[in-house]
């Protein structure tokens, strides 16, 4: 079949994207699903910094590529057990094979075949169903239809609005998961979140959910700081202030028990580490350019019993965590709908990524 989607053929085009137009809406031939795969009609797809980092070249990927990884849709054709036409699914951006070492240990985010497929721009099988175009993180959700591995899909409640359902596949799973799964934050412990995009605000919602206190939110955009306060942040700190780290330490009585860096910046990671107390845990969630590195006083890791942890996909098991977070949203305990800034059309994506790059949005969602 022929699908209409947003294809990136060259990374690193200059901003504004509304003028350089790195994403071109094209018609691409999509082959039918193979064994263990699904044909899905896409209903909605979120615009994420992980997409933006491919567009601007800070996260190199094979080209050309049909972007979009945070998405939801309806199964049209199933070639996999456990799924049928009419099922509503959300996607995880790492397909978990279920058989490799990390999968056997319950660490689906670190699936080795899944990581290899994502790097190669293929589905989990190693094949491509898009003619002449690579898949983005096994999904390629910026198109009206997609073929995905069933290992990328999780069945969800069909009553969920698609513009909300899409958020659970990346922003919510990554941010909430960093708090619940990676850090395992306990009630009454202090937490600080550096960066208030979709993932950062999801981490803040996760901190509220588990009863962290106080919760400090850090960003450079005043409107995001105000939103963070309304979502449960105890203190909001403007990262443009030279004393931002000291303000966080003062608000948390000497440093946070848990610090979350969601920007994808080595400099911000160093700030997050500096804002963490003795014996505390610094969790990095953002994806910096592969050339970036960060440094810390090595002795502090021992003498202060510090921990630095990475969190990918929120250390989640998508088949377990996505339905759990959806249920918490439906119960009113995880108000992820507050993260939705606006909905856009396929032809509006370049301008929408300008807005995302400028920090003018939290989550914009492409609707079909």
Image: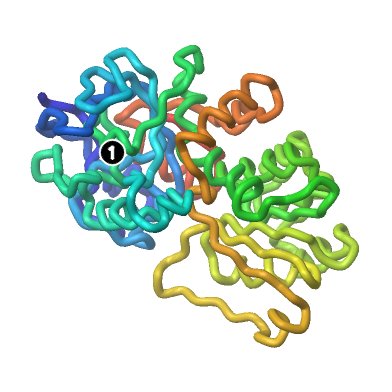
Please identify the quadrant where the C terminus is shown. Answer: top left
Q: How many numbered callouts?
A: 1
Circle 1 packing at 10 Å, graded few (<14), some (14-19), many (20+), is many
Which is more toward the observer, 319 or 16?
319
Quick check: 123 left or right of 199? left
Asked which quadrant contains residue 66, the reply is: top left
Is any atom of residue 260 visible in this view?
yes
Quick check: 292 left or right of 94? right
Q: Is residue 84 above or below residue 285?
A: above
Which is more toward the observer, 356 or 63?
63
Give the residue displayed 20% in from the left and 26% down from the top. Answer: 79
Asked which quadrant contains residue 341, the reply is: top right
Q: Secondary structure at mark 1?
A: loop
Disc 1 marks which residue? 140
Please identify the quadrant where the N terminus is shown. Answer: top left
Q: Is residue 132 above or below residue 282?
A: above
Give the residue displayed 56% in from the left and 26% down from the top. Answer: 326
Residue 367, horizontal then vertical, whole percent: 38, 23
Q: Is residue 365 above or below residue 331?
A: below
Give the residue displayed 51% in from the left and 25% down from the top. Answer: 164
Residue 75, horizontal then vertical, whole percent: 29, 20
Give the residue displayed 32% in from the left and 46% down from the top. Answer: 97
């Amino acid at each position: 079949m022929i699908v209409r989607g947003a294809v990136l053929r060259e990374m690193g085009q200059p901003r504004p994207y509304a003028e350089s137009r790195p994403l071109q809406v094209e018609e691409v031939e999509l082959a039918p699903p193979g064994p263990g795969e699904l044909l899905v009609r896409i209903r909605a797809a979120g615009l994420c910094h992980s997409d933006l980092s491919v567009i601007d070249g800070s996260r190199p990927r094979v080209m050309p590529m049909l972007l979009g990884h945070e998405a939801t849709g309806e199964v049209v054709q199933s070639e996999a057990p456990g799924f049928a036409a009419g099922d509503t699914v959300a996607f995880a951006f790492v397909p978990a094979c279920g058989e490799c070492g990390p999968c056997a240990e319950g660490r689906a985010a670190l699936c080795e075949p899944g990581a290899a497929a994502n790097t190669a721009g293929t589905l989990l099988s190693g094949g491509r169903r898009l003619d002449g175009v690579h898949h983005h993180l096994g999904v390629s959700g910026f198109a009206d239809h997609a073929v995905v591995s069933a290992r990328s899909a999780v069945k969800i409640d069909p009553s969920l609005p698609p513009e909300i359902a899409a958020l659970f596949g990346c922003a919510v799973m990554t941010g909430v998961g960093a708090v619940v799964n990676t850090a395992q934050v306990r009630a009454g412990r202090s937490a600080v979140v550096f960066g208030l995009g979709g993932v950062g605000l999801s981490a803040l919602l996760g901190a509220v959910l588990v009863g962290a206190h106080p919760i400090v939110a850090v960003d450079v955009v005043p409107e995001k700081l105000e939103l963070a306060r309304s979502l449960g942040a105890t203190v909001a700190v403007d990262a443009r202030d030279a004393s931002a780290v000291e303000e966080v330490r003062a608000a948390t009585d000497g440093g946070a028990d848990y610090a979350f860096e969601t920007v994808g910046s080595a400099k911000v990671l160093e700030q997050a580490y500096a804002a963490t107390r003795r014996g505390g845990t610094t969790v990095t969630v953002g994806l910096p350019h592969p050339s970036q590195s960060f440094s810390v006083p090595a002795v502090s890791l021992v003498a202060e019993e510090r921990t630095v942890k990475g969190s990918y996909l929120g250390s989640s098991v998508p088949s377990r965590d996505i339905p759990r977070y959806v249920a918490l949203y439906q119960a009113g305990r995880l108000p992820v709908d507050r993260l939705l800034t606006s909905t856009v059309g396929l032809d509006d994506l370049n301008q929408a990524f300008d807005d995302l790059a400028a920090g003018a949005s939290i989550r914009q969602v492409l609707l079909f």
